Image (cartoon, rainbow, N blue to C red):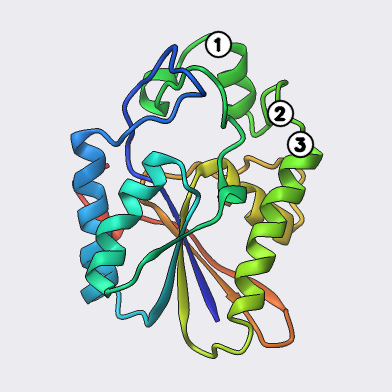
Amino acid sequence: MQLILVRHGEPLAVSGQAGGADPALSPQGHEQGVALAGWVAGAGGEKVVEVVASGMRRALETAAPAAHALGLDVVVDPDLAEFDVGRSSYRPVHERVGSDDPEWRRISEGWFPEFVDAEAFTARVRGAFGRIVERHRDAGRESVLVVCHAGVINTYLTGELGIDRPLYFPLDHVGLSRVLVSRSGRVRVRSVNETGHAAGLL
């Protein structure tokens, strides 16, 4: 089987949101989601049998057009939520680049911010992907589209590749990474951060 891991589209900034920041997509982010749907339904040529999303609004809004194009419902797995879930504010990456914010500095260097329980987050992420793989272990050449977050995708990829820094890969909005999983459970990372399907929207 193949996992197609997609970072959500560009979100809006949110601050002081009760219950934790859960931003919607920006207009650009919605366009990116439509581009992803076009790729999945057409030029991608992939046999996608399930669409999974984290349950955070920016992931759900990105996944929705692709699921609609495929005639599938979105399967929500809350364990795919980003490490900042529950925080009261959210600033998109393009607003943080070059900032002196210590949290951003750690992220840009490939490390989790200090507030993250790295062990618990990693276990949560690996558990979520483990369940997806278990559902489709005998799927052969079928694919599962997983729309989630840069920290989630990085944590899974770096774990499989044996890379110490958990946030090693810069990932674009709706950039996709492919992971092949054999029936025996052998994992092979095929690609990281493909962006051709969203040309002109990044």
Which type of secondary structure does the marked residue at label 1 adopt? loop
Q: Dots 3 and 2: beta carbons under 8 Å?
A: yes
Asked whether residue 159 appears in the rendered view, the answer is yes
Who is closer to the viewer here, 151 or 164? Answer: 151
Residue under pointer 1: 101
Q: Disc 2 residue type?
A: Val
Who is closer to the viewer here, 152 or 86? Answer: 86
Coordinates of residue 189 in the picture (x, y in percent): 60, 67
Query: Viewed as shown, does residue 7 lie left or right of 163?
Result: left
Residue at 72% over, 79% down: 186
Residue at 26% over, 52% down: 33
Q: Residues within 10 Å of mark 3 (few under 14, many from 20)?
A: some
Seen in the picture, residue 135 relative to 78 is either above or below; the reply is below
Q: Residue furthest front?
A: 19
Residue at 18% over, 36% down: 27
Seen in the picture, residue 177 relative to 7 is either above or below; the reply is below
Coordinates of residue 49 in the picture (x, y in percent): 42, 79
Residue under pointer 2: 116
> Of the residues under marks 2 and 1, which one precedes in the sequence?
1
Q: Residue furthest right?
A: 119
Alpha carbons under labels 2 and 1: distance apart: 16 Å
Q: Disc 3 vs disc 1: which is toward the camera? A: 3
Q: Disc 1 residue type?
A: Asp
Q: In the picture, which quadrant includes the C terminus?
A: top left
Q: Residue furthest top?
A: 100
Q: Residues within 10 Å of mark 1 (few under 14, many from 20)?
A: few
Q: Disc 3 residue type?
A: Ala
Seen in the picture, residue 13 relative to 73 is either above or below; the reply is above
